[in-house]
Structures are given as structure tokens and as C-alpha cells.
Amino acid sequence: MRTPIEPQKLSSVLSSALDTDQDGFVTVGEVLDRVAERGFGLLLFVVAIPTLIPVLPPGASGVVGMVYILLGTQLVAGLAHPWLPRRVRSHRLSPKVVAAIKERGVALMERIERFSRPRLLFVENSFLLRLLALLIILYGIILFLPIPFMNTLPAMGILVMGIGLLNRDGLLLLAGGAIGIGSITIVITGAHVLIRIQAWLRGLF
């Protein structure tokens, strides 16, 4: 009986993905290609971090929202690897950035691996992943709405989903989806309440 081969740990994958090639540089596209199908999780994880800030700088929420819509649409379409514009893929990471990611990013992944591991792999089926992708798209749309302090909660769900995709952790994927549904519901409810309050105030004056 053959023993199933466990997926390589993400910390090892990320470390090897940052190795320079023959020209001595590593590009964004090369990192994503080496991370392979985990590239979606890597991008979601990275982009989710700044959206944890309650109030983003002017214009930043729209840019982040577009990234989420782009990634979510690609997941719905069933792409195995994330597509990025050629200019972004060809961007060279400076040696300082590569060293910082290897030192801090890999260490962070090693800490994540203490509680996150490949499990419930059935969650990775195309139907469930497309449902999660629809949540990501919806969150991207929400970021375009002028609602202050409403991006932090959904960002937590996206961050957890990103870790789930990175580590092939079905439990975290489901948890991220649950957080996303709950937080998006809160955002929609909050927006409705704000609209009602604004209408009431206009009626007073």
C-alpha cells in the first residue's frame, strides 16, 4: 500500500520560491509560478493585511477592491494560477525585499504552520472554491462603497481564506468563508442603518 505524499510545507515552498535564477534576480511572476496554485492564497494574504486598517487612505480601498475582484473572478473562472499584468509579473524584487521576506515572511509562515496544516482537502473542490471566490468578489465591491470603518471585519475573513489556500487548510477555508458571510452581512446591515439615519436627519432639517 502506497503512503500518501504530504504537500510540501508552505514555509519551504516560499523560501525556495525566493531563490534567484541565473540572472541573479527574482521577479513577482517567478515567485507566483514557483508557488504554483498557492499563488492565489499568497496574493490574498498579502493584500488583506493593509485592509485590516479601519480607515484606508483615500483611493486605496478602490485599488484593493479591484485586486480582490480580479482574483475572485479568476477563481470563479477556474484558473489554476493567478494572472497578473505583464508589467507586474516582470517587476524585480530588490535584494533587500527578498532578504526581508525570507527572514520575516518565512518565519511568519512557520508560526502559522503550528496551527494550520493540510486537512479537509475535499473543500478544495471547484464548487466550494467558486462559492468562496464569490465572497471575495462581493468584498471587493464593498470596498468601493463610501462606508467608513467597514473594511476590517471582511478583511479578517479574506486573510483567513488566504492562509487556508496557502496551507491547503480546508478548515480555515471554511472558517474564512463563515467569517466573510457574517462580516459582509454586518457591513450590509450597517450600510442600511446609515442610509436610514441620513434620510431621517435630512427629514429633520
Image: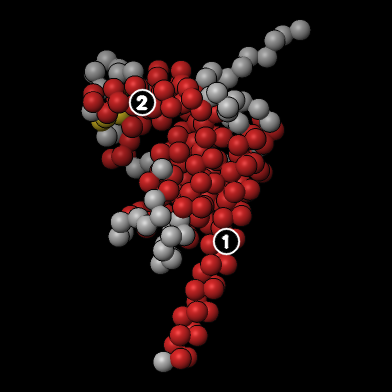
Question: Where residue 56 sits: x, y (%)?
Answer: 35, 55
Q: Is residue 129 visible?
A: no
Give the residue pinned by disc 1: 186
Residue 146 in view here: yes
Quadrant where the C terminus sits is: bottom left
Considering depth in this image, is 178 or 126 the residue closer to the camera? 178
Location of the N terminus (image quadrant): top right
Marks counted in the figure total 2
Q: Is residue 65 left or right of residue 176?
A: left
Q: From the viewer's perspective, is 97 left or right of 13?
A: left
Seen at 52% across and 20% down, the residue is: 9
Q: Residue furthest top?
A: 1
Q: Position of residue 85 (x, y in %)?
A: 34, 42
Disc 2/disc 1 C-alpha distance (Å): 34 Å
Under circle 1, the secondary element is helix
Q: Say how the picture is coloured.
A: secondary structure
Q: Residue at x 30, y 17 (%)?
A: 21
Residue that mark 2 sits on: 104
Q: Residue furthest right?
A: 1
Q: Residues within 10 Å of mark 2 (few under 14, many from 20)?
A: few
Residue flagged by tag 1: what amino acid is it? Answer: Ile
Task: Look at label 2 and name its amino acid.
Answer: Arg
Which x, y percent locates residue 146? 40, 67
Query: Please, is residue 201 above or below residue 31 in the view?
Result: below
User: In the rendered image, which quarter is residue 201 located in?
Assistant: bottom left
Q: Quadrant of residue 118?
A: top right
Q: Residue at x 44, y 87 (%)?
A: 202
193 vs 17, nearest the viewer? 193
Residue 31 image point, x, y percent: 38, 27
Q: Secondary structure at mark 2?
A: helix
Residue at 30 percent across and 26 percent down: it is 100
Quick check: 141 above or below 84?
below
